[in-house]
Amino acid sequence: MTTPKWLEPAAARSSQETWTLGHVLLQYRTKRNLTEEDLARELETSVDTLRYLCLCRRPEGPELAQQLATITERFPVPAEKLEAILREIAG
């Protein structure tokens, strides 16, 4: 499948919105000094999939587990790794 031209700029824009997973992932990348490629490898996925993840709503609250399950059913990333990132950034 060809990567849509809008994906990279949309993922970059998402990092500016605190309610997105893109914001969390950018904070994590900044904290750990990681490139997109580094984070994609850490999450065992592609850069394109990482960019799609950025467009998701940030999982939080009492429904965190269900939200993570929904995201990881749609995108091939380990739920435990994504959850660890969320917890690290949440403090």
Image (tube, rainbow, N blue to C red):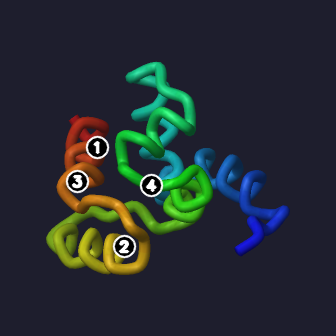
What is the x, y in percent for residue 35?
55, 29
Residue named by callout 2: 71
What is the x, y in percent for residue 73?
33, 79
Residue named by callout 1: 85
Contact flag, marks 3 and 1 (Cβ < 8 Å): yes
Q: Residues within 10 Å of mark 1 (few under 14, many from 20)?
A: some
Contact flag, marks 4 and 2 (Cβ < 8 Å): no
Q: Would residue 31 be found to the left or right of residue 68 on screen? A: right
Where disc 1 sits, the SS reads helix
Which picture quadrant has residue 74?
A: bottom left
Contact flag, marks 1 and 4 (Cβ < 8 Å): no
What is the x, y in percent for residue 67?
28, 74
- Seen at 76% across and 70% down, the residue is 2
Which comes before the other along the chain, label 1 or label 2?
2
Alpha-carbon span between mark 3 and mark 4: 15 Å
**48 relative to 73, above or below:** above
Which comes before the other along the chain, label 1 or label 4?
4
Amino acid found under the numbered disc labelled 3: Glu
Q: Would residue 70 be found to the left or right of residue 57 on screen? A: left
Alpha-carbon span between mark 1 and mark 4: 15 Å
Where disc 3 sits, the SS reads helix
Amino acid found under the numbered disc labelled 4: Thr
Residue named by callout 3: 83
